[in-house]
Amino acid sequence: MRTVNLESQKNGTMSKAKEKSAKKRVVEEDDDQLPIFDKDVTEKKAGEEDDADLSDSEESVFSGLEDSGSDSHDEEEDAEEGDDEDDDDAVILDEILTKSSGVETATEPPATDKNTPTVNMGVLFLLQKQYSRVQNVKTAPKQKRKMKKGEGVAMDDGGEKGLINTRHGDEYEHDTSDEEDIRNTVGNIPMEWYQDYPHIGYNLDGKKIFKPIRNKDELDEFLDKMENPDYWRTVHDKTTASDIRLSDEQVDLVHRLQKGQFGDVNFNEYEPSVDFFTNEVMIHPVTNRPQDKRSFIPSLIEKEKVSKLVHAIKMGWIKPRKPKETTPQYYDLWAKEDPNAILGRHKMHVPAPKMRLPGHEESYNPPPEYLLTEEERMAWEQQDAEDRKLPFLPQKHSCLRAVPAFSRFIHERFERCLDLYLCPRQRKMRVNVNPEDLIPKLPKPKDLQPFPTTMSLVYIGHSSLVRSISASPTGQWLVSGSDDCTVRFWEVNTGRCMKTLEVGGAVKSVAWNPNPAVCLVAVCFESTVLLLNPGLGDRLVVSSTDQLITSYEPPEEDKEQAVTWALSEGPEHDNGHRLTLTHPKAVKQVVWHGKGDYLASVMPDNSSNLQVLIHQVSKRRTQNPFRKNKGLVQCVSFHPLRPYFFVATQRYVRVYNLIKQELTKKLMTNCKWISSMAIHPGGDNLICGSYDCRLAWFDLDLSTKPYKMLRHHKKALRGVAYHKHYPLFASGADDGSVIICHGMVYNDLLQNPLIVPVKVLKGHQITHDLGVLDVTFHPTQPWVFSSGADATIRLFT
Amino acid sequence: MGGLQKKKYERGSATNYITRNKARKKLQLSLADFRRLCILKGIYPHEPKHKKKVNKGSTAPRTFYLFKDIRFLLHEPIVRKFREYKVFVRKLRKAYGKAEWTGVERLRDNKPGYKLDHIIKERYPTFIDALRDIDDALSMCFLFSTFARTGKCHVQTITLCRRLTVEWMNYVVTSRSLRKVFLSIKGIYYQAEVLGQLITWLVPYQFAHDHPTDVDYRVMATFTEMYTTLFGFINFRLYQTLNLVYPPKLDSKAESELKAEHEEDYAMDSESYLEKLSALSASLARVVATAEEEENQLDLFPTEGEDQENMQAREKEQKEQEAQKRLFEGLKFFLNREVPRESLAFILRCFGAEVSWDKSLCIGGTYEVTDETITHQIVDRPDMDKQYINRYYIQPQWVFDSVNAQMRLPVEDYFLGTTLPPHLSPFVEEKDGDYVPPEKLKLMALQRGEKPVQEDDEEEEEEDDEEEEEEDEEEDDVDDEELTEEKNLKKMEGTRAQGKTLAVKVTPGKVKPWETGSVGNKVRLEQEEKAEEKRLAIMMMKKKEKYLYDKIMFGKKRTTREVNKLTAKRKAHEDASKAQKKQKKAKKQ
């Protein structure tokens, strides 16, 4: 590697030097700097002297030139010969150089010209070119530099050649590695082969080149390194086994090449390019060779071809191309039409609907009512194109000539096209029904009388919403409980408030004992259930009730109960309080069993099983029927005849058999939240009101799903009730209305109940978004009471 | 429970439908080619009943084609032509790229084309099917024939469309099958009854089109390609049914007449021929030269009862139609240059009139303005300098209205420079409950043969304004209180102007019927009861039926609302115009 580098550098330096000298020659300066490599020069001189015969080598010189020009010379093939030749070249050109050095440029052509007579045309041409190049100082260096650069890297030894190049400024003169500055003639071999010999090769005269007496060892090397200031620029030449100190120029060159720059400092790499060939078409031929004879004689082959074609045309084999038929040809396409052919491809084919026919508003001169008013026009303009009922603005033109073109005509046609091929089609059944036919045929309400139709009485007295009402079994009295912490007793027929009792909290529920032989009212507020004896009605009944309560004898063993029973005394007793049941939690509802001895109270609580308690008044006993919590209990109810117990949680109504102590049925109400429940006096039907405006009628014999869902109310239902004797039921809701329905239940099991709404009763004002809170029927008459959030109770008869 | 588990979406509706992209892949076509194929073959997407099921559980919006449709497309020979064309384009591009001009020329010469005949036959197995579907084809061809010969589509297409539409119009003229015409703001609608099919088409007004940029003309061109083929075959068949020569030729007599006049105006005979045809003034040559065909009478069969009635009705209808066909027979029209010549000539010729126009307007005019026998001259300008005394100068709307009314309307309303009566759409058929404009009522009365009374009334009204006014006031008192104030004010003004005192008058109050006695009360009660009954019954409706019922009722309510709105608007307009009239009169006085 090192050698290679060295050679190249040497070469570069030399060439550069030579080139410089050439330049100097041109500008006529002194050439004192010419020999940079003293050694080289001396040796060259020696070579020159040795190789005196100039004429002899002339032939080879030019052949060498030609070779280098063609650039096809194979260096490996004939190394020896090439070497010789190149040597010759070098010498000759050196001579030329020496001759011409110090001579003006004008004198150079003769120097080259003198060789010409002996060489052939091509070479002459080359030389002429070469000459022109030398003259053309500007362009020449570019090519030269290119070559040199290539050589510097690729070749082992190009020193001599570089020299040549520079001397003559000729790119054809350079050549491959054969043209070397050779001191050692051993060739390109590994120098280790000479390790064991005293010499390292042979010089040009065939004499041995001896190694230096003493090889530099490590110490020498070190000393050299320490002492010799030029050590860094000294390189070892293996072929001659001598050290060479690089000159400044050479070092500079090395640096430049390391940086990837051109070897020549003066080389301008950005010179404007000059066309090698002119781009202009020249009028004169390049050659003046006479035209061929064959260009004047008609071609036989062509003649043959033409005659063939002519023959084919004559025979009618080739016909002229028919002009293309551009207009379509029409004929009777349906000449053989099959009337039974199925239209289209299959039965799923949906023919495209026709375009809508225009109405009056599309006329150019429509009746005035079809024109849009200013507001309508504004609205039309602000609407989206899809939302517009009319896709255009109706306009009136006084005469036909004033009608302009419709700007969206092409659009509409295009949209129709899109509809035809892009719009999904679907067959839609158009319902053509008379709306009257849809209304179910129901028996006339008139035929289903009696039912309450008009509001007769309003019981005014409460100051807050009346949560609950209950009628006495005789139908003479009515009890109501309100949020103003009072319980009021009313006479039904007169609307007179008989009694007002203050209790210690908002009354949630009141229930009159259904047993006509007992005069007891259960009232619940907060966590207390109060049994009252209002002292109204038959004296005997009142006193017997009191007796019933006082006749209680506590049992021997006192059982732990969830509720504490307390007998009222003193002023409370005078007020009518009889028994106080203190519950552990707030009570929401109380309900009597039909016989009037049992009482159920509801304490809604999601987390415990203590939600429903059943009390027996005569024995003052309380029991919790459920062991498990099945959800938040909304309301409970006793079966009127059989020992069944209905518990409504949020979504389900569970029916328990109290004797067998098991669940018999679970009714799915399909409601979100049950608010109230009522059992038909027959015991086989049940209605559930819910907060999601629905009323579900269950036929217990039929299914656990509702027989009918009624969505009559607009708002949440609060109370539902059955009439004891008449086939009526009522529902009160937050929309302030009470709807009375005829609900006939037949004894025949095969016949489903008949449900007909008969009356919508309105009267209650809606306050705080609450309307009717409770409804209850009169026990004997077809009358209905309703209590509302407007603090009134109303009687509809 | 043995057996393989059934996989979802491998049977049922999911397999009956295919998405567009899948269909495209199955057919190995580009989107453009697929579109073209769908247009030509009349394949359209279907909306599945259960979109989610078909879409394999996804709710993404996709268009679905019937799988059968796509399978049907698989065997379409035209698909191969599409591919050939694609290859052709590729080759051509290559040849261009290499600048092989001879190659380009050769390729051009052998450009692959396709015919749509088999597709037409396949889509419309019978002629009537084709005729039923020709509406869009007609409208499209009429539109394309009005395009300029530059730019948007091939000139051949435009000329072909023009040719076909001219043929169609000639057919309609010859068969006298035009039924209704309507001047809308979009263009002119025509409705013809051809072989029992009602065919409606729309022709734009003769203006240069302002071509929109957001319209894909390739789609339109593909449609037109299909329509022209269909249209041509239909025309051929129609001409055959009338024993006319196809392509149409002018009557030899007419031809010779025309030839004499306009020989030098046209360079080529072929050019002028289409023009002559489109002039619509000459009759066409027939295959078998016969005299005017005898109108075939309906054969009478002895029938009884309802059939007889039907028969009579049919007979009457037939007669009416015949009468309509001869609506303008014997009249001689002259078209001024400012009226749309083609449409008017077409309509008038369809109903048996003779038409002519100025020689400079178009080829084919048969007589001059100076002809004394002209009965009507159609004019659309405010005034005419030189008027002939023995002809009516009427506005073009008269022709249209007369055609729609199936009778020659009185020409007074349509005279030169008068304000035209509203032009009504003949396509609207009012059901009971719909709004009927008063003009239509008037027209119906005219058709029934009643004398127009309205106008006399108006004149009278103007004569004895005073009484009218008072009557008006009374009416107003009863009808609408809103306008009374305004009325009063106006009246005050009027009286002040006239310098007369206002006559004080007390009108007897009307007693509402239900307040009078028990009879009315009963009636009212009954009504209320009925209403409540209905309300209660509605409460008991099933959910589904309730929904349907509500929808129907909503629709009904909307229509009544609209009708009310229109009536109110009309009333307001009439009141305003009346007031204006009065004001004018007051000013005069």
Image (tube, grey):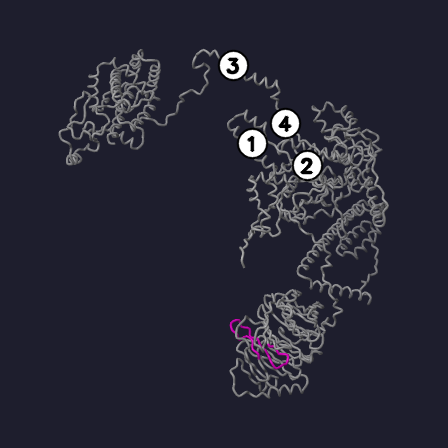
Looking at the picture, which amino acid does disc 3 mark?
A: Ser
Q: CA distance from mark 3 to mark 2?
A: 57 Å
In the rendered structure, the residue with mark 3 lies on which chain?
A
Q: CA distance from mark 4 to mark 2?
A: 21 Å
Residue B445, relative to residue A463: is it above or below? above
Say which residue label 3 marks.
Answer: A299
In the rendered structure, the residue with mark 4 lies on which chain?
A
Say which residue label 2 marks.
Answer: B230
- Give the label, 3 or 2, closer to the camera: 3
Q: Are marks 1 and 4 in contact (CB under 8 Å)?
A: no
- Can you say which quadrant of the picture contains the C terminus of chain B? top right
- Decide whether residue A32 is among the magenta residues: no
User: Residue B116 location in percent, x, y?
Assistant: 64, 35
Q: Are marks 4 and 2 in contact (CB under 8 Å)?
A: no
Q: CA distance from mark 1 to mark 2?
A: 27 Å
- A573 left or right, relative to B274: left
Query: Do callouts 1 and 4 point to residues on the same chain?
Result: no
Say which residue label 1 marks.
Answer: B88
Query: Do callouts 3 and 2 point to residues on the same chain?
Result: no
| Disc on res. A324 | 4
Looking at the picture, which amino acid does disc 1 mark?
A: Phe
Q: State the SS at label 3.
A: loop
Q: Are marks 1 and 2 in contact (CB under 8 Å)?
A: no
Q: Residue at x 45, y 16 (%)?
A: A282
Neighbours of disc 2 within 10 Å: few (<14), some (14-19), many (20+): many
- Decide whether residue A591 is among the magenta residues: yes
Q: CA distance from mark 3 to mark 1?
A: 36 Å
- Front residue of B561 and A703: A703
- Give the label, 3 or 1, closer to the camera: 3
